[in-house]
Amino acid sequence: MSLSKSKYCNGLQCKKMLWLYKNMPEEISELGNQRVMEQGNLVHEVAKYLFPGGINIPYSENLNEMLDNTSNTIESYKNVVITEASFNYDNNFCSVDILVKKGDEYEIYEVKSSTTIKDIYKDDAAYQYYVLSNLGLNVTKVSIVHINTEYVRHGDLDLNELFIKEDVTEYVKKVQNEVKNNIKSINEYLKQESIPKDDIDLNCFDPYLCPFFDYCTKDLPRNNVFSIAGMPVKNKMGYYKKGIISFEDLENQRINKNYKQQIEYELYDKNDYIDEEEIKKFLQELTEPLYFLDFETFQMPIPLYEGTSPYKQIPFQYSLHYIIDNKLFHKEFLANGKGDPRRDLAERLVQDIPRDTCVLAYNMSFEKTVIQSLARSFPDLSEHLLNIHDNIKDLMIPFRKRYYYTRDMQGSYSIKYVLPALFPNEESLNYHNLELIHNGVEAMDNYAKLASLDEKEYEWTRERLLRYCELDTFAMVKIYEKLQEVTNLKRVLK
């Protein structure tokens, strides 16, 4: 198996992972990394303009073609910038994101969409230095290029402010013997014909979640320490290494009461726990008219709009159910997918939610953050927006504080667990029954392509986005009603 820089990094995290990639790729679990990959590709494309006039080596399944194109380009210019320059040394292949040639000296720039530098990024760069230097290239500088979260866009993109170039030359030179030994160790390991016996450890989660974790833990009990919601991975692995693995093993351990509750409810199928007094106190803080609010947002590593920063949450949609005189109403907003959606959304929001009105959100910190950001961006609307912000209460509290707990919540207070636990047979509340869009990631992806659709596809996709977001707030209404029901405060909405 020839190594590439990604395979080398996989091997550093876990050589068994690399063996499974090679021999049992069918056991890979889907980790939902497509969006991360797409954003990474976007950052790579933009970063190329840090060095204008560069020559790109096109990708080809024929590696020799890329190698030949790179070699020809290097030989043709005394000074040149090459993107995706490809090299192979002793069956170790790498493509350099940005290679700068200055006479007989070379600089490597490895581009990452991250906002900080991880150790694995430096190891990636060290591998590239190993390949190029062993081919005789005089590499004088190695840098990692990553996103600067402090950058705020004003006018055209300022790439020198958007990106940070961090010099890691000293590190990569220092670890070259380690790189050589790592490559040898990885290649020897991959010669094994039978499945390696390596046990799971913290490296299954760091620096990335291993896509073979489910496979490597397939023989563990169905309910095991890794099923405990909220417990730090380090603690889970600590119990595992002591042989304390199943819920039965954990039952007698001195652990957090919430973890113990999850274990006991699973083992003994206990009746629902309902603290009526605490739920009543929560409900009594709510006043009608009562509004239920949920935003959909997207994040981009490259700020698209004036006054925005990398990875800032940009709201493009909201759903609003509200109760007045015991009657349920609904309003909604969805931008058209063209340009900055924030102003139109903010104007509609202050029209739709009166001042001094009680607003419910599920995990209110998200909605509050979005509204604060809108208030900073639009000072003329800030007073009303901040009034909405100050009147938001969190529907998650009764579940986060375990005033209401059922076995089917599986230790979680996420609405995606709470809702089916409270309404297991109500098909109208099942996100799987929706068309096209079933979660926030799918909402982001479909909004991103909305403006490029023809009229028929646009209307169909728009309707799917609206129905998804509507279900978010309708689900909150149903949860609110359930809390009333279990405390005998129920009012039937008309």
Image (cartoon, grey):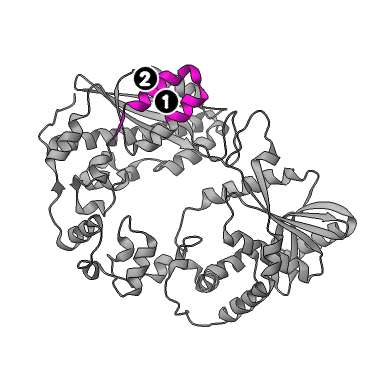
Disc 1: which residue:
333
Q: Is residue 262 left or right of residue 268?
A: right
Q: Amino acid at mark 1?
A: Phe
**Residue 434: image location, x then y, percent:** 36, 40
| 407 and 162: which is toward the camera | 162
- Indicate whether residue 388 is drawn in magenta: yes
Q: Residues under labels 1 and 2: Cα distance?
A: 10 Å
Disc 1 vs disc 2: which is toward the camera?
2
Vertical placement of residue 26 versus 48, above or below: below
Disc 2: which residue:
352
**Residue 425: image location, x then y, percent:** 21, 45
Q: Is residue 481 visible?
A: no
Q: Amino acid at mark 2?
A: Asp
Q: Is residue 390 left or right of residue 64?
A: left
**Residue 484: image location, x then y, percent:** 15, 34
Residue ID at (14%, 61%): 268
| 453 and 417: which is toward the camera | 417
Residue ID at (55%, 72%): 22
- The segment highlighted magenta reads 371-394
**Residue 65: image location, x then y, percent:** 77, 62
